[in-house]
Amino acid sequence: MKNICEWENCSEEGKFKAPIEKDNSKKFRLLCLSHIKQFNKSWNYFANMSQTEIEYFLKSDTVWHKPTKKFGSADNFFKILWNNVLDEKLDIFSSANFKSYINTKKLNQLEREAFSILNLNENSNWDQVHKQFKVLVKKYHPDKNSGNTEYENKLKSITLAYSHLKKLYGKK
Protein backbone atom coordinates (compact mmCIF):
# COMPACT_ATOMS: atom_id res chain seq x y z
CA MET A 1 0.00 0.00 0.00
CA LYS A 2 1.37 3.40 -1.05
CA ASN A 3 1.34 6.41 1.22
CA ILE A 4 0.20 9.57 -0.55
CA CYS A 5 2.03 12.85 0.01
CA GLU A 6 0.22 14.89 2.67
CA TRP A 7 0.92 18.20 0.94
CA GLU A 8 -2.23 19.91 -0.20
CA ASN A 9 -3.34 18.82 -3.71
CA CYS A 10 -0.45 16.35 -4.22
CA SER A 11 -0.96 12.77 -5.37
CA GLU A 12 2.69 11.63 -5.42
CA GLU A 13 3.95 8.87 -3.14
CA GLY A 14 4.92 10.17 0.35
CA LYS A 15 8.21 8.52 1.33
CA PHE A 16 9.81 11.18 3.54
CA LYS A 17 8.93 12.09 7.12
CA ALA A 18 8.46 15.74 8.09
CA PRO A 19 7.91 16.68 11.75
CA ILE A 20 4.63 18.26 12.72
CA GLU A 21 5.81 19.65 16.07
CA LYS A 22 9.15 20.79 17.51
CA ASP A 23 8.95 18.69 20.66
CA ASN A 24 10.82 15.71 19.16
CA SER A 25 7.62 13.69 19.32
CA LYS A 26 6.87 10.86 16.97
CA LYS A 27 4.30 12.98 15.13
CA PHE A 28 5.16 13.45 11.48
CA ARG A 29 3.62 13.61 8.05
CA LEU A 30 4.74 11.90 4.87
CA LEU A 31 5.80 14.02 1.89
CA CYS A 32 7.05 13.34 -1.60
CA LEU A 33 10.59 14.31 -2.66
CA SER A 34 9.73 17.71 -4.13
CA HIS A 35 7.61 18.73 -1.15
CA ILE A 36 10.12 17.50 1.48
CA LYS A 37 12.74 19.68 -0.23
CA GLN A 38 10.40 22.65 -0.10
CA PHE A 39 9.53 21.87 3.54
CA ASN A 40 13.23 21.60 4.53
CA LYS A 41 14.05 24.96 2.95
CA SER A 42 11.45 26.70 5.09
CA TRP A 43 11.83 24.62 8.31
CA ASN A 44 13.40 26.50 11.21
CA TYR A 45 13.41 24.65 14.49
CA PHE A 46 14.31 27.83 16.35
CA ALA A 47 11.57 30.01 14.85
CA ASN A 48 9.67 31.96 17.52
CA MET A 49 12.41 31.32 20.13
CA SER A 50 14.35 34.07 21.86
CA GLN A 51 18.15 34.15 21.79
CA THR A 52 18.18 33.00 25.44
CA GLU A 53 15.90 30.05 24.65
CA ILE A 54 18.09 29.06 21.70
CA GLU A 55 21.26 29.20 23.83
CA TYR A 56 19.59 27.18 26.60
CA PHE A 57 18.46 24.57 24.05
CA LEU A 58 21.94 24.25 22.54
CA LYS A 59 23.59 23.96 25.97
CA SER A 60 21.02 21.38 27.06
CA ASP A 61 21.55 19.46 23.81
CA THR A 62 25.13 18.63 24.84
CA VAL A 63 23.70 16.32 27.54
CA TRP A 64 20.76 15.05 25.49
CA HIS A 65 18.34 17.32 27.37
CA LYS A 66 18.78 15.30 30.57
CA PRO A 67 19.36 16.91 33.98
CA THR A 68 22.95 16.74 35.19
CA LYS A 69 24.57 17.09 38.58
CA LYS A 70 27.90 18.57 39.50
CA PHE A 71 30.52 15.97 40.40
CA GLY A 72 30.76 17.46 43.88
CA SER A 73 27.04 17.18 44.63
CA ALA A 74 26.19 14.77 47.43
CA ASP A 75 23.89 12.55 45.34
CA ASN A 76 26.08 12.22 42.25
CA PHE A 77 26.23 8.50 41.42
CA PHE A 78 29.86 8.53 40.33
CA LYS A 79 30.98 10.42 43.41
CA ILE A 80 29.20 7.92 45.68
CA LEU A 81 30.74 5.00 43.78
CA TRP A 82 34.22 6.55 43.86
CA ASN A 83 33.98 7.26 47.60
CA ASN A 84 32.86 3.69 48.25
CA VAL A 85 35.85 2.36 46.34
CA LEU A 86 38.23 4.67 48.18
CA ASP A 87 36.73 3.72 51.54
CA GLU A 88 36.71 0.07 50.44
CA LYS A 89 33.03 -0.16 51.37
CA LEU A 90 32.61 -2.44 48.41
CA ASP A 91 35.38 -4.63 49.86
CA ILE A 92 36.73 -5.55 46.43
CA PHE A 93 40.37 -4.81 47.23
CA SER A 94 40.66 -6.50 50.61
CA SER A 95 43.47 -9.01 50.85
CA ALA A 96 41.03 -11.79 51.83
CA ASN A 97 38.95 -11.25 48.72
CA PHE A 98 41.99 -10.90 46.53
CA LYS A 99 43.55 -14.01 48.06
CA SER A 100 40.46 -16.00 47.13
CA TYR A 101 40.70 -14.50 43.63
CA ILE A 102 44.32 -15.69 43.37
CA ASN A 103 43.30 -19.13 44.63
CA THR A 104 40.54 -19.51 42.04
CA LYS A 105 42.63 -18.09 39.19
CA LYS A 106 44.96 -20.45 37.42
CA LEU A 107 48.46 -19.05 37.59
CA ASN A 108 50.57 -19.17 34.47
CA GLN A 109 54.19 -20.33 34.43
CA LEU A 110 55.64 -16.81 34.81
CA GLU A 111 53.47 -16.13 37.85
CA ARG A 112 54.50 -19.42 39.47
CA GLU A 113 58.18 -18.65 38.78
CA ALA A 114 57.77 -15.17 40.26
CA PHE A 115 56.47 -16.63 43.53
CA SER A 116 59.30 -19.17 43.50
CA ILE A 117 62.01 -16.52 42.94
CA LEU A 118 60.68 -14.59 45.94
CA ASN A 119 60.58 -17.83 48.00
CA LEU A 120 56.80 -17.50 48.55
CA ASN A 121 53.93 -19.90 48.12
CA GLU A 122 51.28 -19.12 45.54
CA ASN A 123 48.68 -18.24 48.18
CA SER A 124 50.70 -15.31 49.53
CA ASN A 125 48.88 -12.00 49.84
CA TRP A 126 50.21 -8.66 48.61
CA ASP A 127 51.61 -7.62 52.01
CA GLN A 128 53.67 -10.83 52.18
CA VAL A 129 54.97 -10.30 48.64
CA HIS A 130 55.93 -6.69 49.36
CA LYS A 131 57.61 -7.58 52.69
CA GLN A 132 59.59 -10.44 51.14
CA PHE A 133 60.70 -8.20 48.27
CA LYS A 134 62.15 -5.68 50.76
CA VAL A 135 63.98 -8.43 52.64
CA LEU A 136 65.51 -9.85 49.45
CA VAL A 137 66.53 -6.44 48.09
CA LYS A 138 68.42 -5.73 51.31
CA LYS A 139 70.04 -9.17 51.18
CA TYR A 140 71.12 -9.11 47.51
CA HIS A 141 71.80 -5.41 46.93
CA PRO A 142 75.20 -4.91 45.18
CA ASP A 143 76.28 -2.29 47.74
CA LYS A 144 75.97 -4.91 50.48
CA ASN A 145 77.86 -7.50 48.44
CA SER A 146 80.87 -5.57 47.17
CA GLY A 147 79.50 -5.28 43.66
CA ASN A 148 79.42 -9.05 43.09
CA THR A 149 77.73 -9.62 39.70
CA GLU A 150 76.17 -12.88 40.93
CA TYR A 151 74.18 -10.92 43.52
CA GLU A 152 73.45 -8.21 40.96
CA ASN A 153 71.86 -10.76 38.60
CA LYS A 154 69.90 -12.31 41.49
CA LEU A 155 68.58 -8.85 42.39
CA LYS A 156 67.50 -8.28 38.77
CA SER A 157 65.48 -11.51 38.74
CA ILE A 158 63.91 -10.59 42.12
CA THR A 159 62.95 -7.16 40.79
CA LEU A 160 61.43 -8.66 37.62
CA ALA A 161 59.49 -11.22 39.66
CA TYR A 162 58.21 -8.48 41.98
CA SER A 163 57.16 -6.34 38.99
CA HIS A 164 55.26 -9.27 37.53
CA LEU A 165 53.42 -9.97 40.79
CA LYS A 166 52.73 -6.28 41.18
CA LYS A 167 50.73 -6.45 37.94
CA LEU A 168 49.01 -9.64 39.08
CA TYR A 169 47.84 -7.94 42.29
CA GLY A 170 46.82 -4.80 40.40
CA LYS A 171 49.34 -2.49 42.09
CA LYS A 172 50.95 0.52 40.43
Image: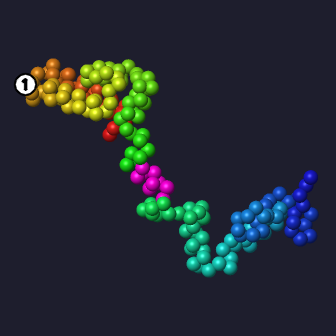
Prevailing secondary structure of the magenta residues: helix
- Rendering colour mode: rainbow
Query: Where residue 21 appears, x then y in whole percent?
Result: 75, 69
Which amino acid is tagged 1?
A: Ser
Determine the image quadrant of residue 11: bottom right
101 on left or right of 27: left
Query: Where residue 53 appears, x then y in whole percent?
Result: 60, 76
Location of the C terminus by quadrant is top left
Query: Is residue 125 positioned above or below 21 on the image?
Result: above
Query: Is residue 10 positioned above or below 78 on the image?
Result: below
Task: Decide which of 30, 102 is in the foreground and name it.
Answer: 102
Query: Where residue 27 appears, x then y in whole percent?
Result: 78, 64
Q: What residue is disc 1 on? A: 146
107 on left or right of 54: left
Residue visible at 91% across and 55% down in the picture: 2
Residue visible at 66% across and 74% down in the picture: 46
Determine the image quadrant of residue 155: top left
Determine the image quadrant of residue 161: top left
Query: Where residue 23 appears, x then y in whole percent?
Result: 70, 68
Within the magenta stretch, is there residue 122? Answer: no
Task: Decide which of 139, 28 is in the foreground and name it.
Answer: 139
